[in-house]
C-alpha cells in the first residue's frame, strides 16, 4: 500500500523554517564577532555555529528531495556545497560572505513557503542568488565581490516602467502607497496612471484596505538600485514589476541584485508570502508543538473529570436528604477540575514571546547598515509566554516600533560622538509578566523626542491648534495621531505618516495599551501591556439598571465613592471630578447608552477610574457586582461595531453581558471635556 507523503509536509515545513531561524541567528552571531580584517580566527572559533548551519541546510535538502520539492533541493545543494567548503577552509571568510549567506536564508525561506503554497518563486531570483553563492567558491573572492557590487548607471537607460500593486492590508503595516508614489518624483519625472478596477462598490468599501494600483513611468537615467530603495520597505506588502526603458538597445538582466519584477500574474502569490516580513513559518502555522508534560497534565485532569462524573452519576434519580453534603462536595470538585482543565488547555496555547522577537535582530542589522548607524539589539525575557494568537498579532507592531527606534531615535555616529555618547547605540527589548498581563518595553538610548519639532509639525498638519497649551506628555502623544510624521523627506524607511497610530490601534484591538515616555538626550521607551490570552480575560462586573457590563481589569485603576462637592460642570459643559490632586472627565454609562438606571445622584452610585494609554477617566455606574474571569465572544460576526462596546460574554445565569471598550470610552470622555473647555474659552 502506497504511503501518502503529503501528511508529513506540514511537519517538514515547520521544522525547516525553524532550522532557518536558527541558521539566521547563528550567522548574526558570527557577524557580530567579526572585527578588523582578520576574519579567519572568528570563523574557526565559531566552528560549531558553522556545523549547526550546515546541519540545518542538509536536513532541508534531504527532506525536500524526499517530498519532491525540486527547487528547494537544488538550491539547498548549492548552499550546502559552499558551507562545506567554508567548514574546510576552502573559501574566504568575510562580512560579505555572511551577508550573502543571510540573503540565501531569505531565498530558501521564500522557496519553502512557495512549495507550501504550491507556487514557484521566480527562477531569476534563485539564479541570481545561486550565482552569488558560486562566486564565493572562486579564489579571488574579495575582488570579485567588490567589483560585482560596484553598480553604475547605464548610458542607454531612459527610465523605468513600474507596475505598483499594493496589497489590501498595506495600511495595517504602516505604509502609504501614495507617499511611495510621491517619493519617486524626488529622483525623476513621473507619469501616473491609476487602475481602479479592483475597487468595490461604496457599500463594501473599507477605508482600512487598499484597492488601487498604479502604472508609473519614471523618466531619467536612474539606476535600478535607486528605484529599489524607494520600494524597499513596501516590497513585502505589494507586487512590483520593473521594466527598463532603453534609448537604443535592449536591457541586459543584471545579476547583482534579486530582480523585483513579477513575470506573470501567478507570481503575485509570492508577494502575499513575503508580506510576513521574513516571519518565521511557525507563526503562520495552524499547529502548535506541545511538550509531553503538558499533554500528560491534561490527560490526568480528564481522568479526574471522569471520576467526578462517576461520583455525580450515583445521585441520578436517587437523591436522598443525607446525600446533599456529598453532592455539594462533588460539585465543588467538578468546579475545581473544570478550572484546572481550562488553565491546562490555555497553557497549551502559550508560546515564548521569542517567536515574535526572533525577527528583530535581522531587521535591526539590515536597517542599521542601510542608515550607517551602529546599533546593538539586546533582548531580555524572550521566554515569557503569551497566547499564540497574541504573539502573531504583535509581530508587526513590534517590528514597527524597533524600526522607529533605529530610524528616528538613534543618532548617527558623528552626532553621538558630539553628544559624548559611545558610537554603539543600544536598543533594548524586554518582556516580563506583571500580574495577569505581559509587559513589553522597547527602549533606545538615542536623542529622545524633539518636542519642539513634533509640535511644529503637528501645527503644520493642522493636527493641533497653533495656540494649544500642551504639556510635554501631551506633545509626546501627538506621535500616535493618524498622518503624523516628523520626517523631513519621504524615504523607504520613514516619512509616510502612517504607522504609530496603527500600532496603538492594533494593540488596543488586543485589549492592551501602548504608552510612550521620552527624555530629551537620553532616549525613548515604548511600553506595551498585553493580556495573556484573548480567549479569557479578568473583568470587573458593573450594573446599570438591569444591565450588566464587564470592564477589562487591565484598565481598571480603582473604584471610588464621590461626594457632591467633588463633581463640577464648568460653564455648563461636561462633568469633571477631583481625583488625586487633579480633575478627570466623568462619563455616565446610562447617558451614553440611553438605558434605564437606578441612581442619578453622584453620591448614590460608584465611579470606576480607568486608565488606558496613560489617559484616565471616570465611569459612573449603579454598583459593582464583582470580579470574575469571562470567556470572550465576538459580536462583529452578527452586529455592526458599536462605539464603546468591544465584545461580549455569557454569565453564569445564561445572560449576555457586554464587554466595554475602555480606550474608546476614555477618548470620548476626554473629547467631551475638551469641547466643553473650548466653549468656555470662546
Image (cartoon, grey):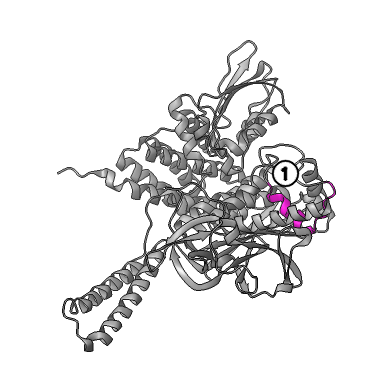
Q: Is residue 96 magenta?
A: no
**Helix, strand or loop at disc 1?**
loop
The residue drawn where x is 46% and y is 43% is 109
The span picked out in magenta is: 466-481
Q: Position of residue 108 (x, y in %)?
A: 46, 41
Residue at the location (69% across, 29% down)?
Answer: 182
The answer to whether residue 325 is left or right of residue 254 is left
- Identified at 30% across, 42% down, the residue is 66
Pinpoint residue 122: horizontal percent, then vertical percent.
46, 30
Residue 374 location in percent, x, y?
A: 70, 51
Q: Nearer the viewer, residue 331 or 320?
A: 320
Q: In the depicted view, which residue is nearer to us: 553 or 176?
A: 553
> Looking at this view, is 3 or 620 the one in front?
620
Check the picture and name the quadrant holding the N terminus: top left
**Vertical relation: 268 (above or below) 15:** above
Residue 521 shows up from this direction: no
Q: Nearer the viewer, residue 347 or 644?
A: 644
**How busy is the neighbourhood of tag 1: few (under 14 within 10 Å), some, or many (20 plus)?**
many
Q: Position of residue 437 (x, y in %)?
A: 54, 66
- Does 512 sit above or below residue 136? below
Q: Which residue is mark 1?
A: 485
Amino acid at each position: 500500500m502506497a504511503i501518502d507523503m503529503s501528511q508529513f509536509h506540514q511537519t517538514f515545513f515547520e521544522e525547516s523554517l525553524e532550522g532557518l531561524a536558527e541558521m539566521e541567528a547563528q550567522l548574526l552571531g558570527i557577524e557580530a564577532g567579526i572585527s578588523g580584517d582578520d576574519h579567519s580566527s572568528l570563523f574557526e572559533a565559531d566552528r560549531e555555529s558553522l556545523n549547526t548551519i550546515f546541519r540545518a541546510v542538509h536536513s532541508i535538502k534531504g527532506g525536500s528531495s524526499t517530498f519532491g520539492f525540486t527547487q528547494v533541493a537544488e538550491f539547498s545543494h548549492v548552499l550546502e556545497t559552499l558551507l562545506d567548503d567554508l567548514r574546510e577552509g576552502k573559501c574566504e571568510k568575510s562580512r560579505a560572505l555572511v551577508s550573502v549567506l543571510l540573503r540565501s536564508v531569505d531565498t530558501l525561506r521564500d522557496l519553502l513557503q512557495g512549495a507550501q503554497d504550491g507556487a514557484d518563486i521566480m527562477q531569476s531570483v534563485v539564479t541570481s542568488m545561486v550565482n552569488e553563492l558560486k562566486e564565493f567558491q572562486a579564489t579571488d573572492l574579495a575582488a570579485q565581490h567588490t567589483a560585482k557590487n560596484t553598480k553604475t548607471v547605464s548610458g542607454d537607460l531612459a527610465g523605468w516602467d513600474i507596475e505598483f500593486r499594493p496589497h489590501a492590508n498595506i495600511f495595517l503595516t504602516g505604509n502609504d502607497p501614495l507617499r511611495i508614489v510621491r517619493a519617486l518624483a524626488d529622483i525623476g519625472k513621473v507619469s501616473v496612471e491609476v487602475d481602479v478596477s479592483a475597487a468595490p462598490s461604496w457599500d463594501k468599501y473599507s477605508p482600512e484596505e487598499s484597492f488601487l494600483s498604479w502604472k508609473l513611468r519614471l523618466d531619467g537615467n536612474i539606476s535600478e538600485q535607486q528605484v529599489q530603495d524607494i520600494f524597499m520597505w513596501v516590497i513585502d506588502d505589494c507586487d512590483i514589476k520593473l521594466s527598463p526603458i532603453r534609448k537604443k538597445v535592449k536591457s541586459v538582466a543584471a545579476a547583482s541584485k534579486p530582480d523585483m519584477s513579477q513575470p506573470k500574474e501567478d507570481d503575485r502569490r509570492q508577494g502575499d508570502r513575503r508580506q510576513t516580513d521574513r516571519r518565521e513559518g511557525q507563526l503562520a502555522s495552524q499547529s502548535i508543538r506541545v511538550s509531553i508534560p503538558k499533554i500528560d497534565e491534561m490527560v490526568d485532569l480528564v481522568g479526574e473529570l471522569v471520576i467526578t462524573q462517576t461520583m455525580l452519576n450515583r445521585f441520578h434519580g436517587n437523591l436522598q436528604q443525607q446525600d446533599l453534603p456529598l453532592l455539594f462536595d462533588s460539585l465543588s470538585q467538578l468546579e475545581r477540575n473544570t478550572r484546572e482543565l481550562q488553565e491546562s488547555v490555555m497553557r497549551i496555547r502559550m508560546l515564548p514571546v521569542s517567536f515574535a522577537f526572533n525577527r528583530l535582530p535581522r531587521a535591526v542589522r539590515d536597517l542599521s547598515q542601510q542608515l550607517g548607524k551602529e546599533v546593538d539589539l539586546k533582548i531580555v525575557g524572550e521566554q515569557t509566554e503569551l497566547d499564540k494568537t497574541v504573539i502573531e498579532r504583535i509581530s508587526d507592531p513590534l517590528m514597527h516600533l524597533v524600526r522607529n527606534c533605529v530610524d528616528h531615535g538613534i543618532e548617527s555616529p558623528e552626532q553621538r560622538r558630539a553628544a559624548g555618547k559611545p558610537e554603539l547605540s543600544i536598543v533594548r527589548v524586554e518582556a516580563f509578566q506583571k500580574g495577569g498581563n505581559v509587559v513589553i518595553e522597547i527602549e533606545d538610548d538615542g536623542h529622545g523626542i524633539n518636542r519642539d519639532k513634533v509640535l511644529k509639525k503637528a501645527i503644520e498638519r493642522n493636527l493641533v491648534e497653533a495656540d494649544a497649551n500642551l504639556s510635554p506628555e501631551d506633545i509626546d502623544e501627538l506621535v500616535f495621531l493618524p498622518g503624523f510624521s516628523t520626517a523631513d523627506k519621504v524615504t523607504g524607511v520613514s516619512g509616510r505618516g502612517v504607522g504609530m497610530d496603527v500600532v496603538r490601534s492594533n494593540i488596543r484591538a488586543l485589549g492592551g495599551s501602548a504608552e510612550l515616555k521620552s527624555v530629551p538626550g537620553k532616549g525613548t521607551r515604548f511600553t506595551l501591556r498585553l493580556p495573556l490570552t484573548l480567549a479569557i480575560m479578568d473583568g470587573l462586573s458593573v450594573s446599570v439598571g438591569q444591565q450588566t457590563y464587564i470592564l477589562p481589569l487591565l484598565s481598571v485603576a480603582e473604584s471610588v465613592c464621590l461626594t457632591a462637592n467633588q463633581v463640577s460642570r464648568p460653564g455648563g459643559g461636561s462633568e469633571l471630578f477631583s481625583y488625586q490632586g487633579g480633575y478627570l472627565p466623568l462619563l455616565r454609562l446610562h447617558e451614553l447608552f440611553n438605558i434605564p438606571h437606578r441612581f442619578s445622584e453622584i453620591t448614590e452610585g460608584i465611579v470606576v477610574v480607568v486608565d488606558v494609554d496613560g489617559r484616565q477617566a471616570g465611569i459612573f455606574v449603579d454598583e459593582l457586582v464583582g470580579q470574575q474571569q469571562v470567556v470572550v465572544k465576538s459580536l462583529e460576526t452578527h452586529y455592526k461595531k458599536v462605539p464603546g462596546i468591544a465584545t461580549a460574554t455569557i454569565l453564569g445565569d445564561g445572560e449576555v453581558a457586554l464587554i466595554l471598550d475602555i480606550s474608546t470610552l476614555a477618548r470620548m470622555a476626554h473629547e467631551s471635556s475638551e469641547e466643553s473647555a473650548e466653549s468656555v474659552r470662546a
